Image (tube, helix red, strand yellow):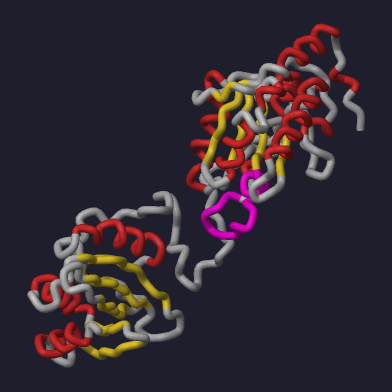
Amino acid sequence: MGFEFVYSSKLEAAVNWARKFSLFSYPFVTACCGMEYMSTAAPKYDIARFGSEFPRFSPRQADLLIIVGTITERQGPALRRIYEQMCEPKWVIAFGVCASTGGFYQNYSTMPGADQVVPVDVYIPGCPPRPEQVLDALVMLQERIQRGEGHSQIALRVDQGYDVPATAIRPVSRPAPAAPAAKGK
Amino acid sequence: MAQLVLDRLLAQFSAGEIIKTGSQHGNEWARVRPEAWAAVATFLRDDPSTAMEMLTDLTVVDRFGDEPRFDVVVHLYSVSKKHRVRLYGGVPEENAIIDTLVPVWPGANWPEREAYDLYGVRFKGHPDLRRLLMYPEFVGHPLRKDYPKEKRQPLVRRQTGGAD
């Protein structure tokens, strides 16, 4: 599958280049993964080297939501609301196996992955992940932003009326929507 | 070690109220009739020789298949006498209700709400018997043995077919 359609203009490429090196993150920290997140942000691993040094504790000032830790069903509405408060385009990283899949919590209270309520761009496995993995995920996300493949970037293009392939709207492994109609939001 | 507590209980209450007592690995326990639950608790707190000032924990055991199905379990500790005792109050499934211990130990408030939330045992006279951990929309009591352990009751989900 190709993503050639995203190179619609040189301007977009330049804007995406600027976006990927100025990510303002909102850490949604709920569990023990938060320690690794702090380690990643602290001088030893120093996420600032990759242009994402500034955690904003307000979703309205952030464009990268980092979901760090277990998400329960009860937290679902709050998480969804925080995501909706962020300005577009916005990106989401699921930090650790609990945020990605629910991890070893297979029970009545734990959400089986934060992607049940918000679209996740990059998943980081590990319980908890090493800081190197987090930096790797950040670089992967930056490559994705440059190519315009973020969920929110694609959604914006759908809203603007571009002809977006159905495979870009959902990964091929999931059932594709019947018609990629413009979303009224 | 706390045989004194059991002796005091048996001297004070009738055999119908204290159904059975025992000691396992040095931990004394007493099985209490649910109707005498609050009276036994008040006595243990107020009697100078037992002096159970502290409620360590309150929880429920689901003995699915047995009668009575639920055991309300209370762990008591005396800070001054340094002894412990454990009380069981068996309640049946169809009438899972027992006296509240909030007037005796205010610390029983949230443990009883948790027990109600997760096991569905109601506490008569509790000042504010709402769910504590699960959300109000939740149906059922998830720590009961007959609750499907992976059954989820989502509050919100992504729309299918959208780009987000």
Quadrant for residue B74, please give it: bottom left
- Residue A51, located in which quarter of the rendered image? top right
Query: Relative to residue A179, is residue B89 depicted above or below?
Result: below
Q: Residue at x 70, y 32 (%)?
A: B162
Magenta residues, dominant SS class: loop
| Residue A9 percent across, percent down from the top left | 85, 9
Q: Nearer the viewer, residue A177 or B12?
A: B12
Indicate whether B93 appears above or below B22: above
Residue at (20% x, 55% y) in the render: B127
**Rendered position, A185 above or below A67:** above
Q: Name, please, the residue furthest toward the top.
A: A11
Furthest residue toward front: A44
Residue A42 lies left or right of residue B78; in this view the side is: right
Residue B60 in the image: x percent, y percent?
36, 71
On whether residue A97 falls in the magenta region, the answer is yes
Is the C terminus of chain A in the top left, top right, bottom left or bottom right quadrant? top right
> From where the camera sits, is residue B16 visible?
yes
Residue A39 left/right relative to B120: right
Answer yes or no: is residue A185 visible. no
For this view, does B37 lie left or right of residue B143?
A: left
Which residue is drawn at the image coordinates 73% and 15% (left, top)? A160
Which is more toward the observer, A56 or A163?
A56
Q: The N terminus of chain A is located in which quarter?
A: top right
User: Is B67 on the left or on the right of B76, as rendered?
Assistant: right
User: Which portion, as a residue range, is magenta?
Assistant: A96-111
Q: In the image, is residue B93 part of the stretch drawn in magenta? A: no
Residue A151 percent location from the top left of the image: 72, 29
Point 71% across, 23% down: residue: A50
Front-most of residues A26 and B85? B85
- Vertically, is B154 above or below B3? above
Name the one closer to the observer, A58 or A2.
A58
Q: Which percent across, then down, holds residue A62?
A: 58, 22
